[in-house]
């Protein structure tokens, strides 16, 4: 039911806005960037593994002995990014199914080093669920993310239209003052001052 003074058609449009048009993403370019970034992270962990090993493998042990860590990180990140963006472009939707698809392929790549089908399927399914839940609950460790495709000014105007309380209701609950004044406030204020203190307060009738 539309609030008083708001046209029903405008209220429905504000409460149920049209879905924004999907913008296709560069899956290849983003995959290359993610692969390089995850490869660098994997190289960092490989360096830690090489430093903590008890054998004297030298500096090249990062590549010769622990290079698999770098490769796993890079392959996992690339598979995840390409899968989720390809799914988004094919479906033309931005929702939690895309991270779920990317998480499944990324987890499957991570499970390949165990060379067993249950590991591939289990890690893929586990990471798919984790990424879907993470995206559905906001996609951020610092709180719910804002919709980047939403115009903030239009959103605030919608809130003012659909949720704004009548002035009289606010005055009945809070009273006048603190920047909230009803019609005829100056006249009532001048009358109270005159009754209590006998002082005529000049005012401008508007």
Image: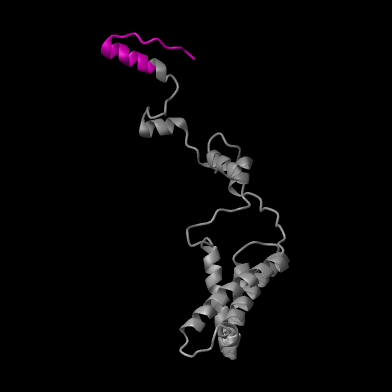
Quadrant hosting residue 44? bottom right
Residue 81 x %, y %: 64, 70
Q: Residue at x 36, y 30 (%)?
A: 175
Q: Is residue 191 magenta?
A: yes
Q: Is residue 105 visible?
A: no
Residue 50: tell me if it is visible.
yes
| Vertical side of 33 occupied by 171: above or below | above
**Relative height, residue 53 to residue 99 (above, below):** below
**Which residue is drawn at the image coordinates 50% and 38% (left, top)?**
164
Residue 169 included in the magenta stretch of the image: no
Apparent side of residue 22 relative to residue 55 in the rendered image (left or right): right
Q: Specify the quadrant of the image occupied by residue 87.
A: bottom right
Q: Is residue 42 left or right of residue 180?
A: right
User: The N terminus appears in which quarter of the rendering?
Assistant: top right
Along the line of sight, the residue nearer the viewer: 187 or 64: 64
Q: Quick one: 131 or 72, which is closer to the camera?
A: 72
Q: Which residues are magenta?
A: 188-206
Is 28 on the left or on the right of 9, as rendered? Answer: right
Residue at image coords 53%, 35%:
4
Residue 101: x and y in percent read 63, 73
Q: Residue at x 54, y 73 (%)?
A: 129
């Amino acid at each position: 039911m539309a609030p008083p003074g708001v046209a029903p058609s405008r209220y429905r449009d504000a409460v149920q806005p049209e879905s924004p048009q999907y913008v296709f993403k560069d899956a290849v370019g983003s995959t290359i960037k993610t692969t390089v970034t995850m490869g660098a992270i994997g190289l960092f962990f490989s360096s830690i593994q090489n430093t903590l090993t008890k054998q004297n493998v030298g500096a090249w042990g990062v590549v010769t002995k622990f290079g698999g860590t770098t490769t796993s990180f890079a392959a996992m990140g690339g598979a995840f990014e390409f899968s989720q963006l390809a799914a988004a472009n094919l479906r033309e939707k931005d929702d939690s199914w895309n991270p779920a698809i990317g998480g499944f392929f990324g987890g499957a790549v991570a499970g390949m080093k165990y060379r067993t089908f249950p590991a591939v399927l289990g890690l893929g399914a586990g990471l798919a669920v984790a990424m879907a839940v993470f995206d559905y609950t906001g996609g951020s460790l610092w709180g719910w993310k804002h919709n980047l495709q939403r115009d903030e000014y239009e959103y605030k105007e919608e809130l003012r239209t659909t949720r704004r309380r009548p002035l009289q209701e606010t005055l009945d609950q809070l009273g006048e003052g603190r920047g909230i004044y009803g019609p005829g406030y100056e006249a009532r204020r001048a009358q109270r001052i005159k009754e209590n203190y006998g002082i005529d307060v000049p005012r401008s009738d508007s």
